[in-house]
Amino acid sequence: MKSFLTFIKSQGIFYGTPKNLSYFWNFGSLALFALIIQFLTGIFLTFWYIPDINEAFNSVEFIMREVRKGWLIRYLHANGASFFFLVVYCHVFKNLYTLSFTEERMWTWFSGLLILLAMMFTAFLGYVLPWGQMSFWAATVITSLVSVIPKIGNDLLIFIWGGYGISQPTLTRVYGLHYLMPFVILFLFGLHMIFLHNTGSNNPLGFFIKSADELSFFPYFVVKDLLGINICLFLLFFVFFNPNYVNHPDNYIPADPLKTPAHIVPEWYLLMFYGILRSVPNKLLGIIFLLSSLFLLFLLPLTIETKTTGTLFRPYYRRVFWFFVGTCLLLSWASGKSVEYPFFEICKITTFFYFFILGFLMPFIINFENRILLGNLKSRNPKYKAPRFKSKYFNLIETNNPFKRKFPAVYTPSIFKRQSIFVD
Ligand code: HEM
C-alpha cells in the first residue's frame, strides 16, 4: 500500500511536467476521459443487449424506447465512439506536428499506434452489434477481405464467420470480442503511460531543462485537463440535439442478407483507410496499400531522425504537416461519396499524396531542415566545428540567436542566450 501511494505521488502528483505545455496537450487526457465514458456506458448497454441475430436489432430498440434513460446511454456510447476518435486523431496530429514521435518517444508512439489499431477493431465490432443493414454489410465487406490471403484465405473466412455466411456464431464472437477489446486498450494505455513517464512529455519549444522548466502535475495540469474536459462536454450537444448526426440511416433497417444497400460506408473515422483500400482496383493490392498506410506510421520514428523537435524552428515541416492534414481530410471526404467521377479520382490522388508525404516528403524535409540548422550555425561561427551529421548530441554554447537570420519569422527564446541547446 505504501509503495502504491509513493507511486501515485511520484507519477500523478509531483510528476515533473514542462510548464509551457499548450492546450494541444489536453487531447491525451480527453482520450482517457472518452475511454472511461465508453466503459461505463458500454457496461450498462450489456444489461439489455441480446447477442442473437433475431433479437439484437429489437433489443437495441428496446433500450431506446423502454429502458429508463436507455436512449441516453446508447447515444452517449454511439457518439462517445466518435468523440473518442476525434480526440485521438487530434492527439495523433498534434504529435505529428510537434515531432513527439521521434527517437526518444518512439515507444510511446508505437504503443499509441497499437491503441489506434485496437480502437479501430473495437469500433468495427461495435458497429456490427445493432444488426442493422450497415452492420451486416460492413461485416460482410470487411471480413471477406481475408479471403484474398493465398491458400488459407477461404478457410480462414469460414473460421471467422463460424459457418458459411455471417450468422449467429459470427454475432456471438463479435460480441465477445467487443467486450474484450476495451480491456486490451486499457492495458495498452498503461504501457503508453509507462513509456511516456520514462521520457517525460515533449513541449511546444521542443527542448526542456529539467527542474528549471517543470511544474508538478498536480494541481497545475490536473486543473488544465479538467478545463479541457469541461469544454469538451459539447459532446452532449450531439447526444441531446443531433444524436444521429454521424450515424447512417440504413442502420435503422434490420439486417437483411438478401438486400445489399446501395452504398456501404464505414463510420467517418475509418473513411480515410477505407478510401485507401477502395482507390486500388485490385482487392489484394488494396489490402496491401491499406496495411502499408498503417505500417508507414510505425516507420516514421525510424525514417525521421532528429533531436530538435520544436516545429517552431521548422517552417518547411510546418507547411508539409498542413498539406498532410488537408490530404487526410480530402481523402476521408471523398471516400464517403459514391465510387464515381470525381470522387474516385480524388481518392486516388490523395492516396498517392498520403504515401508520398509520409514516406518521402516528411523525412526529406526534416533532414533538409536539420542541414539548414547545422549550416546556419556554422556560418555564424566559422570556428565552430560541426560534428558528423549522424552524431548523437552536441552542445551549442553562446549561439546567441542562431536562427534569426535564416528564419526571420521565428522568435528565438531568451533561453538560447544562456543555455546550450541540442541539435542532432
Ligand atoms: C486511448 C487512447 C490514448 C490515450 C488515452 C492517450 C493518452 C495520452 C496522454 C494522457 C498523454 C500525455 C499528454 C499528452 O501529450 O497529450 C499522451 C502522450 C502521447 N501519446 Fe497518447 N494516448 C492515446 C492514443 C495515442 C495514439 C493513437 C498515439 C499515436 C499514434 C499516441 C501517441 C502519443 C505520444 C507520441 C505522446 C507523447 C506526446 C508528447 O510528449 O508531446 N497516443 N497520450
Image: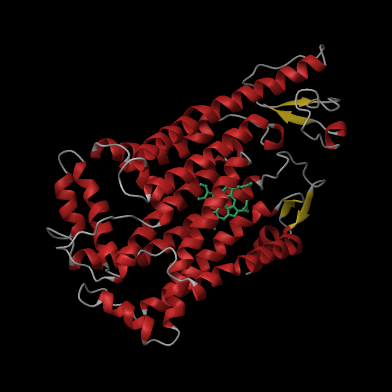
- Residue 396 at what x, y percent from top left? 79, 25
Quarter of the rendering containing residue 266: bottom left
* Residue furthest to the front: 341
Q: Residue at the spot x=31%, y=37% of the render?
A: 288
- Residue 187 at what x, y percent from top left? 47, 58
Count of marks placed on residues? 0
Q: Residue at the spot x=57%, y=48% of the render?
A: 195
**Is 33 placed left or right of 150 in the picture?**
right
Q: Residue at the spot x=58%, y=37% of the render?
A: 321
Which of the two residues, 65 or 293, is positioned nearer the viewer here?
Answer: 65
- Residue 283 at what x, y percent from top left? 24, 40
Q: Quadrant of the N terminus?
A: bottom right
Quarter of the rendering containing residue 420: top right
Picture layout, residue 168 above or below residue 277: below
- Residue 167 at what x, y percent from top left? 17, 65
**Is 407 placed left or right of 155 in the picture?**
right
**Colouring scheme, one of rainbow, by chain, secondary structure, one colour:** secondary structure
* Residue furthest to the top: 382
Does residue 75 appear in this view?
Answer: yes
Does residue 310 appear in this view?
Answer: no
Picture layout, residue 340 above or below residue 171: above
Quarter of the rendering containing residue 318: top right
**Is 247 placed left or right of 56 in the picture?**
right
Picture layout, residue 403 above or below residue 96: above
Q: Residue at the spot x=39%, y=60% of the render?
A: 123
Q: Quadrant of the C terminus?
A: top right
